[in-house]
Amino acid sequence: MGEAKRKAQARAKRDVLSKPLNPARFNLYALGARMAPTRIISEERSYWSDHEERVLGLVFRDRIDNDYGWMLLARDRVGRFRCIKVDVSFTSEQLAIERVRESIAQTIENGNIEDVGYQGDEPNEPFDLLRVAVGEDEAKLHPFFKILRDDPARTPARAVFKELGPWLAPTDPHFVHEFQFQQFDQRLWELYLWAAFRELGFDIEQPEAPDFLCSAPGVAFTAEATVVSPSTAGPLSQHPDPQTADELREFLAHYMPMKFGSSLTSKLNKKNKAGESYWDRGETANKPFILAVADFHKPGSMEEPGSMSYTHSALWPYLYGHRVDWEVIEGKLVVRATKNPEHRYGNKTVPSGFFDLPGAENVSAVLFSNAGTLAKFDRMGVVAGFAPPGHRYLRVGYRFNPDPNAIVGIPFQVEVSDQNYTEFWSDELQIFHNPNAKYPLPPETFAGITQHFFKEGDHHSITPEGSVLASQTIILRFTRDEQGRSVA
């Protein structure tokens, strides 16, 4: 066979047995595979796979040598996509693309596709978030877990959990059971944080405590997750359920700061049997420490949004001990931070200013998101191409308004399955830096997310353009009427 004919056959086989892959789909598959240093030394250029997506291909540019390389990934014994082959020093991107597609085709043709990704260091069994152990009482499953597992509209979220689950090997042996039964919200928040930290470029270890040890070249920090849950006793168990603008203002000024405060101070004061706080323990000591909090105290429904979508404005005043007063003077918005000594609700009073509490200097920052929900996992699954037939996913809400005189966000409505729609795990993250921190976090550690500072008696923020302040996801399921017409 002549060389020209051989190349033509290889090209035809390459084109038949491989295809371009949606970047968002590759990002989901490879979320746990990327190592932090590779993001610095290489630039990802294109993504490929076989038609059944059993083997993935990546083409990248070497930032140092300014040449190109490619990589193959396949699933290991527990289902994680990991590197199985790499080649470098190609003079052109097109040549690297041709080679990675040829390698995908050869891997498929050679068979044993189930074994090609085995690494030899896998755990005994995968970390399956959705499989309920034999003998468990299904009647006791958390209602949100049952929705996740059984509702056809949650197909996108299930696809995401399938990919994330095998990467998680927490030291807590009760993680899966608690996710399925008693502590769905807490565990969901931890899963969301893991995905966001990985997306932001950090390698992650999971010590016994705190929940995460994150590192990248030049930076390392620890993080402990906590949630605001419904109060079952005490003054805060009497939920005010605000209905008017004045009631909502009072709710955000007093009730919600107490709720955030309860969750945060319990972590601040918690010690292990050796008397060590989170920031004192082994390899986590002498590093910046973050408390990551989300509000799950009142779930949403078809009639009204969950508390998470509107309570975040209560967090800043509690953390920094100041409320925000504003007025419009001659057409310009004037904002002032006014000292707020305490928060009152019923017969309960707590001091304002979490970062001023004794010991809080050990907390470098508080991380918050109002998007650590099932809706977020659904949207990320839809963006990755896992939307089921007969369903539409709409997102409505408010984006950050860059107008310095704006007092409300910019309303938006988008179709998540639109091919031009993009979304990332870290989009809604906000970090509140502690001005008194013993180990401050450099702002560049979390470049690209909303960051808050308090200095010289005033509040300062860095907010990326287009940031979502609050949103809801509306899922439409289409059926057929008696005449066979599609209806929502």
Image: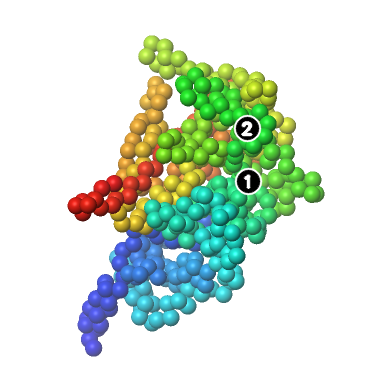
- Amino acid type, callout 1: Glu
- Give the residue drawn at x 68%, y 31%: 234
Circle 2 residue: 237
Which residue occupies the extreme left position in the image?
A: 483
Q: Quadrant of residue 265?
A: top right
The one nearer the camera, 382 or 340, is: 382
- As helix, strand or loop, the secondary structure at mark 1 comes to strand
**x and y percent of residue 209 in the render?**
68, 51
Which residue occupies the extreme right position in the image?
A: 274
User: Is the residue 134 above or below the residue 312 in the image?
Assistant: below
**x and y percent of residue 300 in the render?**
47, 39
User: Is the residue 329 above or below the residue 125 in the image?
Assistant: above
Left or right of 185, for residue 163: left
The one nearer the camera, 59 or 459, is: 459
Left or right of 73, for residue 100: left
- Give the residue drawn at x 24%, y 76%: 12
- Amino acid type, callout 2: Ser
Q: Residues within 10 Å of mark 1 (few under 14, many from 20)?
A: many
**x and y percent of residue 82 in the render?**
48, 67
Residue 481 in view, yes or no? yes
Circle 1 residue: 224
Left or right of 476, for residue 149: right
Query: Which of the two marks, 1 or 2, is nearer to us in this view?
Result: 2
Q: Residues within 10 Å of mark 2 (few under 14, many from 20)?
A: few
- As helix, strand or loop, the secondary structure at mark 2 comes to helix
Count numbered badges in the picture: 2
The N terminus is located in which quarter? bottom left
- Give the residue drawn at x 48%, y 17%: 326
The disc label shown at residue 419, or none: none
- Give the residue drawn at x 44%, y 61%: 29
Which residue occupies the extreme bottom position in the image?
A: 1
Distance between the Cα atoms at labels 1 and 2? 25 Å
